[in-house]
């Protein structure tokens, strides 16, 4: 299998061969952040507003459609978190921005290249995919967390440390709660956003131009081309 960009898969229709049906379109990508592999995709069925999960093992992608054997290949996906790196900003260890991820290339499910507005990035240099930012480091070792040295601390400093420890403990407790996640882009949330790139539909038909404000006409046109996700990823 040759390299393929995720942007070429997002919004593609999923067709079941045995039922001869379109069972939805690809809404988002699900990444195994530890292995830096694509596990599968979230498929949205607009007719009943159901989100399903489709494993890469149960599909075949071509230039036009995502093909599956039958609808049994789709799994319940309401609680599946996509963990998609697209839209995240990449920072180096000094805090300098390497741009926001707009696409990435995969081969046999393995992420080979992250593409930002500024450069192309080898995923092996990304320390962690799970945070709000992707941190780029050419060092093979993760940064060592520094611990507080309680020597020579006065009472005021000690109180600050205790308060910080309390806040961190609260955050950890919140993070330990598994909140059900549902991936769905509401079209009302797109109204008023500004396009940061030209967005094209089928047969290279223009949906919206860069710097154009998204209105109902643009959303309606994007829906007819199954490019709602493209509006989201190319707007701010």
Image (cartoon, rainbow, N blue to C red):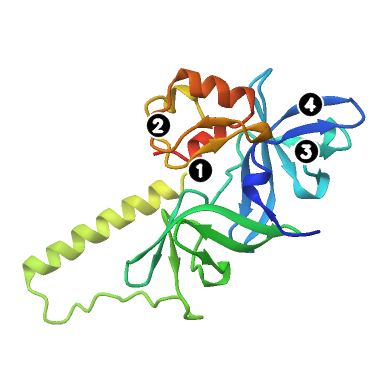
Is 167 on the left or on the right of 68, as rendered? left
> What residue is drawn where x is 69% and y is 52%?
39
Sequence-first tag of 1 and 3: 3
> What residue is drawn where x is 62% and y is 62%?
36
Q: Nearer the viewer, residue 185 or 229?
A: 229
Numbered label attached to residue 64: 3
Is disc 2 surrounded by few (<14), some (14 to 19) or many (20+) residues within 10 Å?
some
> Nearer the observer, disc 1 or disc 2?
2
Sequence-first tag of 1 and 2: 1
Q: Are marks 1 and 3 in contact (CB under 8 Å)?
A: no
Which residue is labeled 2 in the image? 212
Which residue is labeled 4 in the image? 22
Residue 217 at what x, y percent from top left?
49, 18
Residue 227 at what x, y percent from top left?
59, 32
Residue 203 at what x, y percent from top left?
68, 33
> What residue is drawn where x is 49% and y is 36%?
232
């Amino acid at each position: 299998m040759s390299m393929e960009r995720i942007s070429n898969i997002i919004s593609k229709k999923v067709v079941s061969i045995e039922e001869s049906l379109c069972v939805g379109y690809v809404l988002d990508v699900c990444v195994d952040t530890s292995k830096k592999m694509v596990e599968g995709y979230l498929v949205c069925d607009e007719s009943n507003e159901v989100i399903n999960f489709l494993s890469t093992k149960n599909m075949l992608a071509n230039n036009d459609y995502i093909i599956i054997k039958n609808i049994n290949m789709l799994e319940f996906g309401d609680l599946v978190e996509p963990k998609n790196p697209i839209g995240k900003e990449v920072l180096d260890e000094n805090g300098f921005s390497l741009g926001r991820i707009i696409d990435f290339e995969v081969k046999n499910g393995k992420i080979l290249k992250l593409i930002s507005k500024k450069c192309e990035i080898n995923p092996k240099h990304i320390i962690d995919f799970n945070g709000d930012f992707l941190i780029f480091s050419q060092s093979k070792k993760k940064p060592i967390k520094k611990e507080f040295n309680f020597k020579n601390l006065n009472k005021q400093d000690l109180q600050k440390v205790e308060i910080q420890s309390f806040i961190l403990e609260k955050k950890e407790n919140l993070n330990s709660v598994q909140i059900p996640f549902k991936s769905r882009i509401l079209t009302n949330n797109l109204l008023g956003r500004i396009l940061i790139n030209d967005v094209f539909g089928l047969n290279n038909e223009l949906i919206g131009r860069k710097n154009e404000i998204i209105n109902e006409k643009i959303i309606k046109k994007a829906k007819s081309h199954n490019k709602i996700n493209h509006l989201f990823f190319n707007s701010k």
